[in-house]
Image: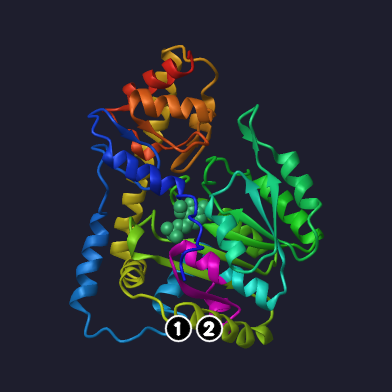
Amino acid sequence: IFSDVEEAQPIEVFHLVKVFNEDKDPSKVNLTIGAYRTDEGKPYYIPVVKEAESVVLDGTLNHEYLPILGLESFTKAASQLLLGDITQRQEEGTIFGVQSISGSGALRVGAEFLVKHLKCTTFYYSIPTWENHHLIFMTSGFQDAKTYRYWNEETRSLDFDGFCEDLSNAPENAVIILHGCAHNPTGLDPTEDQWKKIAEIIKEHKLIPFFDNAYQGFASGDLEKDAWSVRYFLSQGFEFLCSQSFAKNYGLYNERAGNLTFVLNSVEDVKAVKSQVTMIVRGMYSNPPNHGARTVSTILNNNLFKNEWINTLKLMTDRIKVMRKSLRENLENLGTTGTWNHITDQTGMFSYTGLSASHVEYLRNKYHIYMLRSGRINICGLNTNNIKYVAEAIADTLLN
Ligand code: PMP
Protein backbone atom coordinates (compact mmCIF):
# COMPACT_ATOMS: atom_id res chain seq x y z
CA ILE A 1 0.00 0.00 0.00
CA PHE A 2 2.93 2.39 0.45
CA SER A 3 4.72 1.86 -2.84
CA ASP A 4 3.33 4.94 -4.60
CA VAL A 5 4.23 7.42 -1.88
CA GLU A 6 6.56 10.08 -3.18
CA GLU A 7 9.31 11.37 -0.98
CA ALA A 8 8.84 14.97 0.23
CA GLN A 9 11.60 17.57 0.23
CA PRO A 10 13.50 17.72 3.53
CA ILE A 11 12.64 20.70 5.75
CA GLU A 12 15.61 22.98 5.13
CA VAL A 13 16.23 24.19 8.64
CA PHE A 14 16.10 20.76 10.32
CA HIS A 15 18.11 19.20 7.51
CA LEU A 16 20.85 21.81 8.01
CA VAL A 17 20.93 21.16 11.75
CA LYS A 18 21.49 17.46 11.03
CA VAL A 19 24.31 18.17 8.55
CA PHE A 20 25.82 20.63 11.02
CA ASN A 21 25.79 18.05 13.81
CA GLU A 22 27.57 15.58 11.56
CA ASP A 23 30.21 18.13 10.53
CA LYS A 24 33.48 17.29 12.34
CA ASP A 25 35.21 20.62 11.66
CA PRO A 26 36.10 22.29 15.01
CA SER A 27 35.46 25.81 13.71
CA LYS A 28 31.90 25.08 12.50
CA VAL A 29 29.21 27.68 13.30
CA ASN A 30 25.46 27.08 13.36
CA LEU A 31 23.44 30.16 12.38
CA THR A 32 20.41 28.21 11.19
CA ILE A 33 17.64 27.29 13.60
CA GLY A 34 15.77 29.95 15.58
CA ALA A 35 16.80 29.02 19.07
CA TYR A 36 18.62 31.14 21.64
CA ARG A 37 22.24 30.33 22.47
CA THR A 38 24.45 31.64 25.27
CA ASP A 39 27.78 33.32 24.66
CA GLU A 40 29.29 29.84 25.10
CA GLY A 41 27.16 28.67 22.18
CA LYS A 42 24.97 26.52 24.43
CA PRO A 43 21.17 26.19 24.64
CA TYR A 44 19.81 28.25 27.53
CA TYR A 45 17.70 26.68 30.26
CA ILE A 46 16.20 29.85 31.76
CA PRO A 47 16.70 29.66 35.57
CA VAL A 48 13.18 30.86 36.47
CA VAL A 49 11.70 28.28 34.10
CA LYS A 50 13.58 25.59 35.99
CA GLU A 51 12.33 26.98 39.31
CA ALA A 52 8.74 27.11 38.07
CA GLU A 53 9.01 23.56 36.76
CA SER A 54 9.92 22.25 40.18
CA VAL A 55 6.87 24.06 41.61
CA VAL A 56 4.77 22.40 38.88
CA LEU A 57 6.19 18.95 39.60
CA ASP A 58 5.74 19.33 43.36
CA GLY A 59 2.11 20.32 42.86
CA THR A 60 1.29 17.56 40.39
CA LEU A 61 -1.20 15.16 41.94
CA ASN A 62 -2.17 13.28 38.82
CA HIS A 63 -2.19 13.41 35.03
CA GLU A 64 -5.89 13.93 34.38
CA TYR A 65 -6.94 15.49 31.07
CA LEU A 66 -6.96 19.27 30.75
CA PRO A 67 -10.12 20.87 29.34
CA ILE A 68 -10.22 20.77 25.53
CA LEU A 69 -9.52 24.51 25.28
CA GLY A 70 -6.70 24.19 27.80
CA LEU A 71 -5.63 25.41 31.18
CA GLU A 72 -7.54 28.61 31.90
CA SER A 73 -4.94 30.13 34.24
CA PHE A 74 -2.54 29.85 31.30
CA THR A 75 -4.74 31.07 28.45
CA LYS A 76 -6.01 34.04 30.48
CA ALA A 77 -2.53 35.16 31.51
CA ALA A 78 -1.16 34.57 28.01
CA SER A 79 -3.87 36.69 26.36
CA GLN A 80 -3.22 39.41 28.95
CA LEU A 81 0.48 39.32 28.26
CA LEU A 82 -0.39 39.95 24.65
CA LEU A 83 -3.21 42.47 24.96
CA GLY A 84 -2.74 44.19 28.31
CA ASP A 85 -5.60 44.90 30.68
CA ILE A 86 -8.43 42.94 29.13
CA THR A 87 -9.99 41.44 32.26
CA GLN A 88 -13.40 42.97 31.55
CA ARG A 89 -13.41 41.59 28.02
CA GLN A 90 -12.31 38.22 29.36
CA GLU A 91 -15.11 38.25 31.90
CA GLU A 92 -17.73 38.97 29.26
CA GLY A 93 -16.07 36.36 27.03
CA THR A 94 -15.32 38.49 23.96
CA ILE A 95 -11.61 37.83 24.34
CA PHE A 96 -10.59 34.28 25.07
CA GLY A 97 -7.59 32.05 24.57
CA VAL A 98 -7.27 28.50 23.36
CA GLN A 99 -4.22 26.56 24.54
CA SER A 100 -2.36 25.26 21.54
CA ILE A 101 0.52 23.07 20.46
CA SER A 102 2.90 26.03 20.51
CA GLY A 103 2.65 28.79 17.90
CA SER A 104 2.33 26.39 14.97
CA GLY A 105 -0.66 24.68 16.56
CA ALA A 106 -2.33 28.03 17.25
CA LEU A 107 -1.97 28.97 13.59
CA ARG A 108 -3.26 25.57 12.50
CA VAL A 109 -6.38 25.65 14.71
CA GLY A 110 -7.07 29.28 13.85
CA ALA A 111 -6.66 28.71 10.13
CA GLU A 112 -9.00 25.72 10.13
CA PHE A 113 -11.57 27.75 12.06
CA LEU A 114 -11.40 30.53 9.47
CA VAL A 115 -11.91 28.10 6.60
CA LYS A 116 -14.72 26.17 8.21
CA HIS A 117 -16.67 28.89 9.94
CA LEU A 118 -15.89 32.18 8.19
CA LYS A 119 -15.70 30.52 4.75
CA CYS A 120 -12.28 32.02 4.10
CA THR A 121 -10.45 30.72 1.01
CA THR A 122 -7.57 33.14 0.49
CA PHE A 123 -4.70 34.05 2.77
CA TYR A 124 -1.82 36.47 2.32
CA TYR A 125 1.67 36.15 3.70
CA SER A 126 4.71 38.39 3.42
CA ILE A 127 7.50 37.78 0.97
CA PRO A 128 9.52 36.43 2.62
CA THR A 129 7.94 34.80 5.65
CA TRP A 130 8.48 31.89 8.02
CA GLU A 131 8.36 28.99 5.59
CA ASN A 132 5.76 27.04 7.58
CA HIS A 133 2.96 29.60 7.15
CA HIS A 134 2.20 28.34 3.68
CA LEU A 135 2.10 24.68 4.67
CA ILE A 136 0.01 25.28 7.80
CA PHE A 137 -2.60 27.35 6.02
CA MET A 138 -2.86 25.08 3.00
CA THR A 139 -3.14 22.02 5.25
CA SER A 140 -5.95 23.81 7.09
CA GLY A 141 -8.02 23.96 3.91
CA PHE A 142 -7.24 27.36 2.40
CA GLN A 143 -7.36 27.24 -1.39
CA ASP A 144 -5.50 30.30 -2.45
CA ALA A 145 -2.09 31.36 -1.13
CA LYS A 146 -1.26 34.95 -2.02
CA THR A 147 1.68 37.13 -1.08
CA TYR A 148 2.30 40.73 -0.16
CA ARG A 149 5.58 42.54 -0.75
CA TYR A 150 7.67 43.13 2.35
CA TRP A 151 11.43 43.06 1.79
CA ASN A 152 13.07 45.38 -0.66
CA GLU A 153 16.14 43.49 -1.84
CA GLU A 154 17.86 46.60 -3.18
CA THR A 155 17.50 48.85 -0.16
CA ARG A 156 17.44 45.98 2.34
CA SER A 157 14.50 47.63 4.04
CA LEU A 158 10.72 47.39 4.21
CA ASP A 159 8.89 47.77 0.91
CA PHE A 160 6.06 49.63 2.56
CA ASP A 161 4.47 50.97 -0.62
CA GLY A 162 4.45 47.49 -2.13
CA PHE A 163 3.01 46.08 1.09
CA CYS A 164 0.15 48.61 1.08
CA GLU A 165 -0.57 48.18 -2.60
CA ASP A 166 -0.83 44.40 -2.29
CA LEU A 167 -3.10 44.63 0.74
CA SER A 168 -5.32 47.12 -1.08
CA ASN A 169 -5.77 44.61 -3.89
CA ALA A 170 -6.74 41.75 -1.59
CA PRO A 171 -10.32 40.50 -1.90
CA GLU A 172 -12.81 40.95 0.93
CA ASN A 173 -12.57 38.26 3.63
CA ALA A 174 -8.95 37.42 2.76
CA VAL A 175 -6.89 36.52 5.82
CA ILE A 176 -3.72 38.56 6.30
CA ILE A 177 -0.94 36.95 8.31
CA LEU A 178 0.91 39.70 10.17
CA HIS A 179 4.02 39.17 12.27
CA GLY A 180 3.30 41.02 15.53
CA CYS A 181 6.98 41.83 16.04
CA ALA A 182 10.47 40.61 15.14
CA HIS A 183 9.46 39.58 11.64
CA ASN A 184 10.89 36.20 10.66
CA PRO A 185 13.10 36.12 8.61
CA THR A 186 13.86 39.79 7.91
CA GLY A 187 13.97 41.23 11.44
CA LEU A 188 12.16 44.28 10.04
CA ASP A 189 8.95 45.56 11.61
CA PRO A 190 6.68 48.36 10.43
CA THR A 191 6.83 51.59 12.46
CA GLU A 192 3.82 52.63 14.55
CA ASP A 193 2.67 55.01 11.81
CA GLN A 194 3.01 52.25 9.25
CA TRP A 195 0.94 49.90 11.42
CA LYS A 196 -1.76 52.56 11.54
CA LYS A 197 -1.84 52.67 7.76
CA ILE A 198 -1.92 48.87 7.55
CA ALA A 199 -4.87 48.83 9.96
CA GLU A 200 -6.66 51.43 7.84
CA ILE A 201 -6.31 49.36 4.66
CA ILE A 202 -7.39 46.17 6.44
CA LYS A 203 -10.48 47.94 7.75
CA GLU A 204 -11.35 49.59 4.44
CA HIS A 205 -11.03 46.36 2.44
CA LYS A 206 -12.73 44.17 5.04
CA LEU A 207 -9.76 41.85 5.46
CA ILE A 208 -9.19 39.55 8.42
CA PRO A 209 -6.02 40.08 10.46
CA PHE A 210 -4.33 37.00 11.87
CA PHE A 211 -1.38 38.04 14.00
CA ASP A 212 1.46 35.66 14.56
CA ASN A 213 3.32 36.52 17.73
CA ALA A 214 6.20 34.13 18.23
CA TYR A 215 8.77 36.56 19.59
CA GLN A 216 7.16 38.86 22.14
CA GLY A 217 10.01 40.34 24.19
CA PHE A 218 12.61 39.35 21.64
CA ALA A 219 12.36 42.43 19.41
CA SER A 220 12.98 45.21 21.90
CA GLY A 221 13.42 43.37 25.19
CA ASP A 222 10.22 45.13 26.27
CA LEU A 223 7.08 42.98 26.34
CA GLU A 224 4.71 45.95 26.08
CA LYS A 225 6.52 47.56 23.19
CA ASP A 226 6.60 44.30 21.27
CA ALA A 227 2.83 43.98 21.65
CA TRP A 228 2.14 47.46 20.30
CA SER A 229 0.84 46.36 16.89
CA VAL A 230 -1.69 43.85 18.24
CA ARG A 231 -2.84 46.22 20.96
CA TYR A 232 -3.33 48.95 18.38
CA PHE A 233 -5.65 46.70 16.39
CA LEU A 234 -7.55 45.94 19.60
CA SER A 235 -7.88 49.66 20.38
CA GLN A 236 -9.29 50.23 16.87
CA GLY A 237 -12.11 47.77 17.45
CA PHE A 238 -10.92 45.01 15.11
CA GLU A 239 -12.02 41.43 15.44
CA PHE A 240 -9.02 39.19 14.92
CA LEU A 241 -7.02 36.13 15.86
CA CYS A 242 -3.53 36.02 17.30
CA SER A 243 -1.21 33.07 17.82
CA GLN A 244 1.41 33.10 20.55
CA SER A 245 4.41 30.88 21.00
CA PHE A 246 6.30 30.46 24.25
CA ALA A 247 9.06 28.47 22.59
CA LYS A 248 11.54 31.32 22.25
CA ASN A 249 10.80 33.68 25.12
CA TYR A 250 10.74 30.83 27.67
CA GLY A 251 13.19 28.52 25.93
CA LEU A 252 10.42 25.90 25.96
CA TYR A 253 10.86 24.79 22.35
CA ASN A 254 9.96 21.14 22.83
CA GLU A 255 7.18 21.64 25.37
CA ARG A 256 4.86 23.17 22.75
CA ALA A 257 3.25 25.85 24.89
CA GLY A 258 1.13 28.19 22.80
CA ASN A 259 -2.07 30.19 22.85
CA LEU A 260 -4.58 31.29 20.25
CA THR A 261 -6.45 34.45 21.21
CA PHE A 262 -9.83 35.25 19.69
CA VAL A 263 -11.02 38.85 19.79
CA LEU A 264 -14.75 39.19 19.09
CA ASN A 265 -16.91 42.27 19.23
CA SER A 266 -20.23 40.69 20.08
CA VAL A 267 -21.06 38.78 23.24
CA GLU A 268 -23.74 36.95 21.26
CA ASP A 269 -21.10 35.28 19.08
CA VAL A 270 -18.98 33.92 21.90
CA LYS A 271 -20.80 30.68 22.65
CA ALA A 272 -20.95 29.50 19.05
CA VAL A 273 -17.34 30.42 18.27
CA LYS A 274 -16.04 28.69 21.39
CA SER A 275 -18.07 25.59 20.70
CA GLN A 276 -16.76 25.36 17.15
CA VAL A 277 -13.11 25.83 18.19
CA THR A 278 -13.72 23.09 20.72
CA MET A 279 -14.85 20.81 17.88
CA ILE A 280 -11.75 21.62 15.84
CA VAL A 281 -9.41 20.81 18.71
CA ARG A 282 -11.39 17.69 19.56
CA GLY A 283 -11.06 16.42 16.02
CA MET A 284 -7.39 17.33 15.71
CA TYR A 285 -5.68 16.25 18.94
CA SER A 286 -8.48 16.14 21.48
CA ASN A 287 -6.70 17.71 24.47
CA PRO A 288 -3.61 19.86 24.95
CA PRO A 289 -0.50 18.83 26.90
CA ASN A 290 0.10 20.08 30.43
CA HIS A 291 3.70 20.68 31.32
CA GLY A 292 4.78 23.69 29.22
CA ALA A 293 1.55 25.60 29.68
CA ARG A 294 1.51 24.94 33.43
CA THR A 295 5.10 26.19 33.68
CA VAL A 296 4.34 29.41 31.77
CA SER A 297 1.20 29.91 33.83
CA THR A 298 3.17 29.47 37.07
CA ILE A 299 5.53 32.24 35.99
CA LEU A 300 2.94 34.65 34.61
CA ASN A 301 0.75 34.34 37.70
CA ASN A 302 3.53 34.98 40.20
CA ASN A 303 5.02 38.48 40.28
CA LEU A 304 8.41 37.40 41.59
CA PHE A 305 8.79 34.76 38.89
CA LYS A 306 7.44 37.10 36.25
CA ASN A 307 9.92 39.84 37.10
CA GLU A 308 12.77 37.37 37.05
CA TRP A 309 11.64 36.19 33.64
CA ILE A 310 11.42 39.77 32.33
CA ASN A 311 14.97 40.43 33.53
CA THR A 312 16.21 37.30 31.79
CA LEU A 313 14.50 38.30 28.56
CA LYS A 314 16.29 41.62 28.78
CA LEU A 315 19.64 39.86 29.22
CA MET A 316 18.99 37.67 26.18
CA THR A 317 17.93 40.55 23.96
CA ASP A 318 20.86 42.65 25.13
CA ARG A 319 23.23 39.89 24.10
CA ILE A 320 21.58 39.77 20.69
CA LYS A 321 21.97 43.53 20.30
CA VAL A 322 25.65 43.37 21.26
CA MET A 323 26.20 40.65 18.66
CA ARG A 324 24.44 42.69 15.96
CA LYS A 325 26.61 45.69 16.72
CA SER A 326 29.75 43.61 16.81
CA LEU A 327 29.01 41.83 13.55
CA ARG A 328 28.39 45.12 11.80
CA GLU A 329 31.56 46.69 13.26
CA ASN A 330 33.68 43.71 12.31
CA LEU A 331 32.32 43.68 8.75
CA GLU A 332 32.81 47.42 8.34
CA ASN A 333 36.33 47.35 9.83
CA LEU A 334 37.28 44.64 7.36
CA GLY A 335 36.04 46.84 4.51
CA THR A 336 33.56 44.14 3.52
CA THR A 337 31.85 44.83 0.20
CA GLY A 338 28.41 46.47 0.61
CA THR A 339 26.65 48.29 3.44
CA TRP A 340 25.93 46.69 6.81
CA ASN A 341 23.64 49.08 8.66
CA HIS A 342 20.73 46.67 8.08
CA ILE A 343 22.31 44.26 10.58
CA THR A 344 21.72 46.72 13.42
CA ASP A 345 18.51 48.19 11.95
CA GLN A 346 16.83 44.78 12.16
CA THR A 347 15.46 43.41 15.43
CA GLY A 348 14.77 40.07 17.05
CA MET A 349 16.64 36.85 16.62
CA PHE A 350 17.16 36.94 12.91
CA SER A 351 19.03 38.96 10.39
CA TYR A 352 18.40 38.90 6.70
CA THR A 353 21.98 39.43 5.62
CA GLY A 354 21.46 39.96 1.92
CA LEU A 355 23.90 37.10 1.16
CA SER A 356 22.90 35.08 -1.90
CA ALA A 357 22.39 31.31 -2.10
CA SER A 358 25.82 30.92 -3.69
CA HIS A 359 27.46 32.93 -0.90
CA VAL A 360 25.67 30.71 1.61
CA GLU A 361 27.00 27.61 -0.11
CA TYR A 362 30.53 29.01 -0.23
CA LEU A 363 30.42 29.81 3.47
CA ARG A 364 29.28 26.31 4.29
CA ASN A 365 31.81 24.53 2.07
CA LYS A 366 34.85 26.62 2.89
CA TYR A 367 34.19 27.82 6.46
CA HIS A 368 31.63 25.34 7.85
CA ILE A 369 29.31 28.24 8.64
CA TYR A 370 25.67 27.19 8.28
CA MET A 371 22.76 29.50 7.46
CA LEU A 372 19.53 29.30 5.47
CA ARG A 373 19.73 29.50 1.69
CA SER A 374 17.90 32.83 1.87
CA GLY A 375 20.84 34.34 3.75
CA ARG A 376 18.91 34.46 7.02
CA ILE A 377 21.10 34.05 10.08
CA ASN A 378 20.17 33.47 13.68
CA ILE A 379 22.11 36.18 15.49
CA CYS A 380 22.03 34.02 18.65
CA GLY A 381 24.45 31.61 16.98
CA LEU A 382 27.10 34.35 17.15
CA ASN A 383 29.27 34.77 20.23
CA THR A 384 32.49 36.43 21.30
CA ASN A 385 34.47 33.36 20.23
CA ASN A 386 33.19 33.05 16.67
CA ILE A 387 32.13 36.53 15.59
CA LYS A 388 35.48 37.55 14.13
CA TYR A 389 35.72 34.27 12.25
CA VAL A 390 32.21 34.73 10.80
CA ALA A 391 32.86 38.34 9.76
CA GLU A 392 36.15 37.43 8.09
CA ALA A 393 34.47 34.55 6.29
CA ILE A 394 31.69 36.81 5.00
CA ALA A 395 34.22 39.41 3.88
CA ASP A 396 36.17 36.74 1.98
CA THR A 397 33.00 35.26 0.47
CA LEU A 398 31.95 38.60 -0.97
CA LEU A 399 35.29 38.88 -2.77
CA ASN A 400 34.72 35.51 -4.44
N1 PMP B 1 5.66 31.89 13.70
C1 PMP B 1 6.89 32.28 13.40
C2 PMP B 1 7.07 33.51 12.59
C3 PMP B 1 7.99 31.54 13.81
O1 PMP B 1 9.21 31.95 13.49
C4 PMP B 1 7.78 30.38 14.58
C5 PMP B 1 8.95 29.56 15.04
N2 PMP B 1 9.97 29.38 14.21
C6 PMP B 1 6.46 30.02 14.89
C7 PMP B 1 5.43 30.81 14.44
C8 PMP B 1 6.04 28.84 15.69
O2 PMP B 1 6.93 28.16 16.39
P1 PMP B 1 6.51 27.07 17.46
O3 PMP B 1 5.47 26.21 16.85
O4 PMP B 1 7.76 26.37 17.74
O5 PMP B 1 5.97 27.84 18.62
**Residue at x 42%, y 15% (from the top left corner):** 396
Q: Tag 2, which secondary structure?
A: helix
Q: Is residue 93 magenta?
A: yes
User: Could you tell whether 389 is left or right of 150 in the image?
Assistant: left
Rendered position, 221 above or below 282: above
User: In the image, which residues are magenta?
Assistant: 86-109
User: Could you tell whether 381 is left or right of 198 in the image?
Assistant: left
**Residue at x 22%, y 29% (from the top left corner):** 26
In this rendered view, identify the residue nearer to me: 361 or 195: 361
User: Could you tell whether 260 is left or right of 111 in the image?
Assistant: left
Label 2 crowd bin: few (<14), some (14–19), many (20+), radius 10 Å: some
Instruction: Name the mark on residue 278.
Output: 2
Q: Are marks 2 and 1 in contact (CB under 8 Å)?
A: yes
Q: Position of residue 319 (x, y in %)?
A: 34, 38
Return the disc, 2 or 1, that comes first in the chain's sequence.
1
Q: Position of residue 176 (x, y in %)?
A: 67, 58
**Residue at x 48%, y 13% (from the top left corner):** 399
Give, as a three-letter code, the residue at label 2: Thr
Q: Position of residue 325 (x, y in %)?
A: 42, 28
Instruction: Please say whether residue 230 is visible from this viewpoint.
Output: yes
Q: Tag 1, which secondary structure?
A: loop
Rendered position, 317 above or below 391: below
Structure colour scheme: rainbow
Q: Position of residue 197 (x, y in %)?
A: 74, 49
Cα–Cα gap, marks 2 and 1 = 6 Å
Give, as a three-letter code, the residue at label 1: Ile
Report if the beta carbon of the residue with label 1 is closer than 8 angstroms to ligand 1: no
Report if the beta carbon of the residue with label 2 is closer than 8 angstroms to ligand 1: no
**Residue at x 29%, y 31% (from the top left corner):** 28
In this rendered view, identify the residue nearer to me: 69 or 115: 115
What residue sits right under mark 1 in the picture?
A: 68
